[in-house]
Amino acid sequence: MTVEAKERVYLNYINGEWTASSSGQTKSNVNPANVEEVVGVVQSSTGEDLDRAVAAAKAAQKAWRKLSGPARGELLYKAANIMESRLGEIAQTMTKEMGKTFPEAKGETARGVALLRYYAGEGSRKVGDVIPASDSQGLMFTTRVPLGVVGVITPWNFPVAIPIWKMAPALIYGNTVVFKPAHEAGVTATKIIECFAEAGFPAGVVNFILGPGSVIGQGIIDHPDIAGITFTGSDYTGKRIAQGALARGAKYQLEMGGKNPVIVLNDADLDQAADATISGAFRSTGQKCTATSRVIVQSGIYEQFKDKLISKLKEIKIGDGMQADTWMGPCASESQMKTVLSYIEKGKEEGAKPIFGGGRLSGGEYDKGYFVEPTVFERVSPNMAIVREEIFGPVVAMMKFDEVEEGIRMANDSEFGLSASIFTKNIGVMLEFIQDMEAGLVRINAESAGVELQAPFGGMKQSSSHSREQGQAAIEFYTSIKTVFVKP
Ligand code: NAD
């Protein structure tokens, strides 16, 4: 498709100007709930475009770093107000572009606004400590300095919140940014950048470039002028980023996949647990890194819990996320749907039994989109692909255990360690779970998905590079500590 397409064409934003890719190539993004609707046309950029974006970010960095923290914060507050005034429009774009329901998209956009305000405030908070020097006349203290140019590479599943929880701290601590979102969320990402542009950030401070991961993503990994790379996405891409960044000594931060368990004990409030399992597993069509994908249930209530889960699942309305009664939307793209369906088939082939769902939805409006049934498997064994690998779709595997220790051991039997939850009334078991569960986020009597912007977020094991994002933890990645000694 060329830039003459009749749909609205969205541009890159480099050095304060909206510009087309030097390749002249573009890509159309369609609505996964109705593939006949083109949501917008985004750029397919080249290494040359990336070089210009990095050069602009590098040139702007010194003046940006020299602005005071509160002055940088003022610009983030402005961007927050602009985004808030456009909340409904941005959320609608998100729903149409990647399928999550409109209420979820509004919630996420409001989260983006709150993140901008939180990090705007960070511009006025402390950045160092005074440490007693061995020379009694000397003054020793630490301060924080920005990395320089930060490359931001993001997935499509939280197209507003993730870019903002990376860009806002990068900017407030004095870095400039080159942002490459997933193309599947390119129109939504453009709207975030419009808010930054309108807020009046100096040219070159925020640069935005759309293009293939293999070109622009790889270019960010390799670029000698990018000092730090922050990435959220798949395990596979994350490992490439780590290797590339390590090879040239760049700082990097990775947030990757999950295979998050919920453990339901005999003494749990079963309605609460079933509601939370459904919400954790199937909201956003299971496309959250913190989504519940393994349901580990104590034998005494297994059948009863299963019946509750199934009867509640029957109430779920699946459809276009813009319709008021839709609870679950489509998969975000055709390739995502194909991946999910292939896992469902693999589960069947390996001998697991689907007790709910298990296929693509068809007929009527479903024929126009990428709709998959919420799917529950039982009779699974620990080595099956649906138990071990991240599916990133509306599929869960149910397993049974007898003793609490066994349940926690099963929950830990994964290469991932992002989030986990447990349902019980027993405080001793809660404490055991908090201690023994290998996950960066553990939640008691609450679903596995649920991240708060003021608290550190990140995974253990293969889910992360062991760094943390959000809250005040963000300063650790986006700055370096400088220790200063002054002798008058
Ligand atoms: P992905 O890894 O395919 O893509 C993520 C980003 O990396 C995109 O912008 C993509 O263009 C880019 N990319 C692709 N190839 C690249 C390369 N060779 N070099 C550099 N960049 C490249 O992931 P996705 O499918 O967009 O997102 C889904 C994944 O994201 C899931 O695994 C999910 O668990 C994970 N995720 C993790 C978190 C978290 O915080 N842990 C949050 C959301 C999503």
Image (cartoon, rainbow, N blue to C red):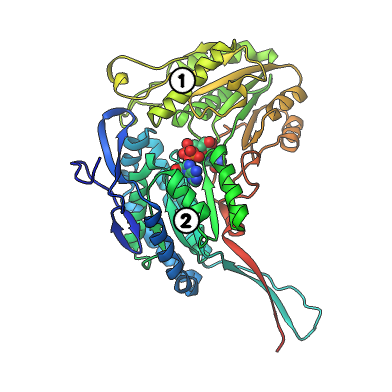
Q: For mark 1, what is the residue? A: 341
Which corner quadrant of the image does residue 158 belong to? top left
> What amino acid type should be assigned to the residue bearing mark 1?
Leu
Q: How crowded is mark 2: few (under 14 residues within 10 Å), some or many (20 or more)?
A: many
Quadrant occupied by the C terminus: bottom right
In-image side of 174 versus 200 (left or right): right
Q: Name the amino acid, label 2.
A: Met
Q: Quadrant of residue 185?
A: top left
Ligand 1 neighbours mark 1 (CB distance < 8 Å):
no
Question: What residue is drawn where x is 49% and y is 71%?
Answer: 65
Q: Against 315, is 413 above or below?
A: below
According to the picture, the residue beneath numbered tag 2 turns out to be: 167
- Mark 2 → mark 1, Cα distance in angstroms: 34 Å
Q: Is residue 165 above or below residue 462?
A: below
Q: Judge from the rendering whether residue 303 lies leftward or rightward of residue 64; answer left or right.
A: right
Q: Earlier in the sequence, mark 2 or mark 1?
A: 2
Which structural element holds mark 1? helix
Tell me, yes or no, if residue 118 can be seen here: no
